[in-house]
Image (tube, grey):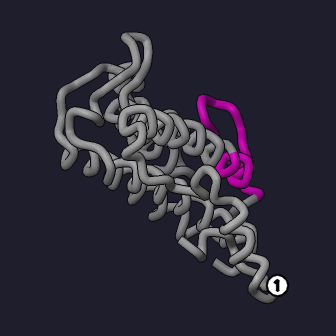
Amino acid sequence: MKNSYLESLFKEFNYYKFLGENTFNQLSDSELQWAPNQDSNSIAIIVKHLSGNMLSRWTNIFLEDGEKSWRLRDQEFISETSNKETILGQWDTGWTCFFNTFNRLDFADLDKTIYIRNQGHTVMEALNRQLAHYAYHIGQMVFIGKHIKNTEWKSLSIPKEKSKDYNAIKFSKEKSKTHFTEDL
């Protein structure tokens, strides 16, 4: 991966993976199943959806449409009782598929056309689309986790009332070219 865009994307995808995993770490099996109401998704359902999406989108990207015929998307939103181990297994399966494909990409691949539901995307457009999609759902997961844990939630970013302290540390250091995730 010799391209700064791909290197930056790699760090961004890993950041959202980090946020999801650090949400799981704070929750029990039953809390992963909790949803605010019948029309909302639990973290377990969101994980099932993300995994299904990753497997469909990133398997054989140059040979097949990103919406595979074997994907049963509607079933991803049906609640099933499962434990944290099963949920984390789905999570890992999806991310492994994504990163196996991503890590083989190079600069020349970014302008190649791939298809999602017969709609052409450059690989760069598809990566941007998926980063936004994953961030959207992982943000939901973090929000649900914060709601469940309430005051017991351990912040995954700068805690409330701590911006001044955080900035003091940052500005006490020399300017440098680093990615914000290198501090995590």
Q: Which residue is mark 1?
A: 175
The x, y position of residue 179, in whole percent, is 69, 73
Query: Going 21% across and 33% down the picture, which residue do you hit?
Result: 30
Query: Going 36% across and 22% down the picture, which residue do you hit?
Result: 35
Q: Is residue 68 visible?
A: no
Q: Is residue 182 above or below residue 157?
A: below
Is residue 126 in the magenta section? Answer: yes
> Which residue is farthest top?
38
> Which residue is farthest bottom?
174
The mark total stands at: 1
Classify 10 Å Cα crowding around label 1: few (below 14), some (14-19), many (20 and above).
few
The answer to whether residue 90 is left or right of residue 4 is left
The x, y position of residue 92, in whole percent, is 33, 55
Q: Is residue 84 visible?
A: yes
The one nearer the camera, 176 or 66, is 176
Q: Specify start and end residues of the magenta stretch as a single range.
A: 111-128
The x, y position of residue 143, in whole percent, is 50, 36
Identify the secondary structure beneath mark 1: loop
The quarter of the displayed image where residue 168 is located: bottom right
The x, y position of residue 50, in whole percent, is 44, 39
Q: Is residue 48 above or below residue 9?
A: above
Which quadrant would the N terminus be assigned to in this image? bottom right
The kind of residue on which mark 1 rests is Lys
Q: Is residue 75 above or below residue 91?
A: above
Query: Going 41% across and 37% down the picture, which residue do you hit?
Result: 150
Query: Going 50% across and 50% down the picture, which residue do you hit?
Result: 58
Is residue 144 in the magenta section? Answer: no
The answer to whether residue 150 is left or right of residue 44 is right
The one nearer the camera, 27 or 52, is 27
